[in-house]
Image (spheres, rainbow, N blue to C red):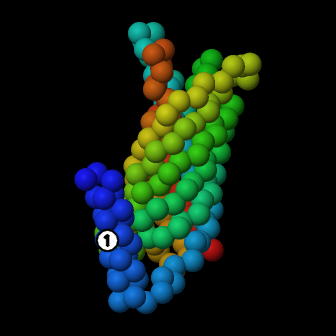
Amino acid sequence: MKRLAIPVVSAACLLAATAVQAQGGPMMYQPSSYVGADALFWQLDPEGRGGDFDSTGLRLRGGVAFNDYFALEGHLGTGGSDGPVDLDYLAGGYAKGMLPVTPQLRIFGLLGATEVEFDGGDDSESDLSYGGGASYAVMPNLSVDADYMRYLEESRFDFDAVSVGATYHF
């Protein structure tokens, strides 16, 4: 019975997708790229060591939106120091799920991986990263954005950032 059910369900899904495609006409969405720059307000919280380190750096973003709901995005960031802690760089890649609330306002979530290096050290840390934010289109090709990211969640420390900036959509 299972051998028959899988092809029947697959065929039904294929027919349903074809019917939806025929009713709505051809999909006209072209992937669109974007670039952005943000002020990166970061915080390093060492577990059990007392005292946080925080500063402000710069983050550059770039990505490709495949439709109104999904994009792939990359982050490069650097800068800022607090006492003995300097952020040399962060680099990461993320899947971005977006939800249009109004024609101008979108909320989004990010999930991916990040590599971070502090203090010119020879070792860098990498981890699963996640976050969320909002984007508001002030012009057809320009938006202002804000987000929160948990870049690293290690046993020894957490590394978070809040970013505010602008994005240009091609």
Q: Pinpoint residue 52: horizontal percent, then vertical percent.
A: 46, 21
Q: Name above or below for residue 15 compared with residue 117.
A: below
Task: For residue 112, say whether it is visible.
Answer: yes
Q: In the visual, does 128 lie left or right of 1?
A: right
Q: Name above or below for residue 31 compared with residue 114.
A: below
| Screen quadrant of the C terminus | bottom right
What residue occupies the far top of the structure in this picture?
Answer: 48
Q: In the visual, does 2 lie left or right of 150?
A: left
Label 1 neighbourhood size at 10 Å, few (<14), some (14-19), many (20+)?
few
Residue at horizontal 48%, vertical 86%? 26
Q: Pinpoint residue 49: horizontal percent, then vertical percent.
A: 45, 9
Residue at horizontal 52%, vertical 79%? 29
Question: Which residue bears the numbered disc 1?
Answer: 12
Q: Quick one: SS at disc 1?
A: helix
Q: Which residue is more in the foreground, 137 or 62?
A: 62
Task: For residue 13, say whether it is visible.
Answer: no
Residue at horizontal 35%, vertical 89%? 23
Q: Pinpoint residue 154: horizontal percent, then vertical percent.
A: 48, 21
Residue 136 figure quarter = bottom left
Three-letter amino acid code at disc 1?
Answer: Ala
Q: Which residue is more in the foreground, 74 or 11?
A: 11
Residue at horizontal 69%, vertical 19%? 123
Q: Which residue is more in the foreground, 95 or 12?
A: 12
Q: Pinpoint residue 33: horizontal percent, then vertical percent.
A: 62, 67
Report the number of discs: 1
Q: Which residue is more in the foreground, 145 or 34?
A: 34
Residue 55 figure quarter = top right
What residue occupies the far left of the structure in this picture?
Answer: 1
Q: In the visual, does 141 lie left or right of 111?
A: right
